[in-house]
Image: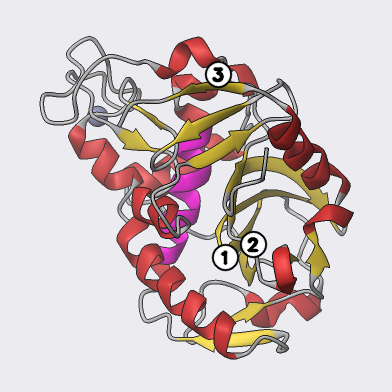
Amino acid sequence: MKLHGVVWLRLGIVSSERFEVAGGEALGNKNGRCVVCGNSPTVKSHLFPRAMMLDMRTDDRPLLEASRHRTGYVERQNGIWDDRFLCKTHEDAAGGGDDYAVRLSRRMIEKSWRHPDGDAFQIDNPQPELLQRFVYGTVWRHFAAPISAPSKLRLGPYQDRIERALFNDGLFDLPIVAAITNVTGHAGRLVPMALAPYRTKLKDAWVWHFVVGYFDVMLKTDARPWPPEWRPYLADRDPLTLFQADRVDLATVPFLRELTDRVRASPYRGKQKG
Ligand SMILES: [Zn+2]
């Protein structure tokens, strides 16, 4: 099988049986309870902004989701969602930075094609708190959604801080570094992808790392300071300076290669409605 242009890579374990979740977006899921306030019904929540996932598609072929924890791949129209854990009010709060991030991401796409050899790009970031809300909300939704349960994500002592910022007017004061993805594929072009948040170490500090579209983000959940040379790239600045590391071919990155090989080699596994 030929690899489609767009691959959505996901490290978490997700069983295919869970994809056919009940409930329509308009009516909500009357059986769901909001994990923030306990109210029903709950509404559809996209773990990555739906528009960013749609922007990765260049034609009508679906996104392909692979995981290193299972064989096969899953087709999705606009990314993973769950309608069992957030009421409308708290979905709006968790996703309150999404539209802003979508606009930023679209400007990044234009810039990245205009300056293929640069190592940093500047873009206006007039409301950095909305970018911070998007980053917190993305990590938190992946953590809190029941569909992510098998991945066993834990925010530890930072859970309360992140939830206070998202839902109770707390501060968005965890350092965030935003970059442009540096992974290339066919003909040396940047490959848009989504990599679900996972915890990793960067220069001795724990961070949550995720990728969506051309956007590569690190949220630091560690008391140790960033290396000073990272300071110019902090997401609370306007304009925002987006770092781009030296480009690497997807085929040479072991864990990405493993995932794309699985997609190429494996049979179709399932799809999520909507
Ligand atoms: Zn609620």
Query: What type is the residue that disc 1 sits on?
Result: Tyr
Res 1 quadrant in image:
top right
Is ligand 1 within 8 Å of the beta carbon of the residue shown at mark 3?
no
Identify the mark nearer the N-term, 2 or 1: 2
| SS category of the residue bearing label 1 | loop
Separation of residues labelled 2 and 1 (CA atoms): 7 Å
Is 139 magenta? The answer is yes
Q: Which of marks 2 and 1 is in front?
A: 2
User: With respect to residue 152, does 178 lie above or below?
Assistant: below
Query: What type is the residue that disc 3 sits on?
Result: Ala
Identify the mark nearer the N-term, 1 or 3: 3
Mark 3 residue crowding within 10 angstroms, few (<14) / some (14–19) / many (20+): some
Q: Ligand 1 appears in which quadrant? A: top left
Residue placed at 88% from the left, 46% from the top? 254
Magenta extent: 130-142
| SS category of the residue bearing label 2 | loop
Q: Main secondary structure of the magenta part?
A: helix
Residue designated by label 1: 214
Q: Which mark is residue 149?
A: 3
Residue designated by label 2: 191
Q: Position of residue 143 (x, y in %)?
A: 53, 31
Q: Position of residue 229 (x, y in %)?
A: 79, 80
